[in-house]
Image (spheres, rainbow, N blue to C red):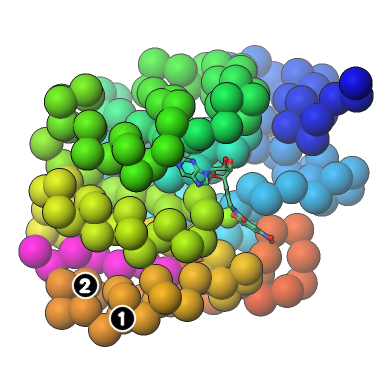
Amino acid sequence: TGSSRPQRMLKAVQKNATKGDPQSVISAIDHYCRHKEWAMNVGDDKGLILDSVLTEVNPSTALELGTYCGYSTVRIARLLSPGSKLITVEFNPAFAEVARQIIAYAGLQDKVTVVEGPSGDLIPKMKERFGIRYFDFVFLDHWKDRYVPDTKLLEDCGLLKKGTVLLADNVICPGAPEYLKYVRNSAHYESRYYKSNLEYTKVEDGLEKSVFLG
Ligand SMILES: O=C(NC/C=C/[C@H]1O[C@@H](n2cnc3cncnc32)[C@H](O)[C@@H]1O)c1cc([N+](=O)[O-])cc(O)c1O
Ligand SMILES: [Mg+2]
């Protein structure tokens, strides 16, 4: 059988990026997805917002829900301070395998742990398995109807502290209306919308940044 879109994306990285250079990996994926084959990476426009929020938070421990091919994983990990860690959760083994290779190509494998399995099962195991007390930063980019249940799970498992920042992709397109209602109406979050556009298109999309108030 033929290759998959993630495998073609990996090929584009191996062909056009420089090993150990995260920015060249990001640029290679963006070029491929803009000119050859669209894919659901957060992309370069929303990626700049992700970069700026991440730089502001400077997390010691970060969590990503929905690795896909590892594009946003590389964007996040390249900005982490020495000794900081990113855990990224992906339940599709084929996607996780491509992501590991893209993360390694960027030379960021020592900062990233790709955990295979459903977020709903893995979040309650974060403390015991990875010695995580809490996350300083969470990037939500998995199935949009998982944003609310997984946010509640993170709260219930005591994995959020006062000041933890949640950043959610696609709150407009494809949309996460229940999540917007949840974080915007809760006294436990201070929420703000960053308007942008859906990756590689002119369609509106944006990121919602929500600070946990404890
Ligand atoms: O649907 C979108 N994203 C869903 C992302 C899904 C990714 O997260 C994993 N996953 C899902 N629930 C999981 C639970 N646990 C672990 N991995 C999980 C899936 O295996 C996939 O790798 C999307 C769609 C568009 N779009 O324009 O259509 C644009 C975007 O930016 C998007 O993010
Ligand atoms: Mg997305």
Image point (31%, 81%), residue name: 184
Q: Whole-Å distance between the Cαs marked 1 and 2?
A: 7 Å
| Residue identified by numbered label 1 | 184
Label 2 neighbour load within 10 Å: few <14, some 14-19, many 20+:
many
Could you say whether the residue bearing mark 1 is in a helix, strand or loop? Answer: helix
| Residue 212 among magenta residues | yes
Image coordinates of residue 168 in percent, x first then y, are 44, 61
Q: Residue at x 43, y 31 (%)?
A: 117
| Residue drawn 57% across the image and 25% down it | 93
- Quick check: can you spot residue 13? no
Q: Name which residue lies at 62% across and 71% down.
A: 173
Give the quadrant of residue 127.
top left
Q: Is residue 33 above or below residue 89?
A: below
Residue position marked by numbered label 2 in the rendering: 189
Q: Which amino acid lies under the numbered mark 2 shown in the image of this protein?
A: Tyr
Could you tell whether 74 is left or right of 69 in the image? Answer: left
Quadrant in the rendering for residue 36? top right
| Cβ atoms at labels 1 and 2 below 8 Å apart | yes
Residue 189: give x, y in percent of width and height: 21, 72
Q: Residue furthest front?
A: 121
Q: Which SS class for mark 2?
A: strand
The magenta stretch is 208-214
> Ligand 2 falls in which quarter?
bottom right
Residue 160, x across and y down, in percent? 17, 52
Residue 151's label in the rendered image is none
* Foreground of the two, 146 or 38: 146
Locate the C terminus and report the quarter of the image it occupies: bottom left
Is residue 90 or residue 88 the one in the foreground?
A: 90
Q: Which mark sits nearer the N-terminus, 1 or 2?
A: 1
* Extreme residue in the bottom direction: 185
Q: Quadrant of the N terminus?
A: top right
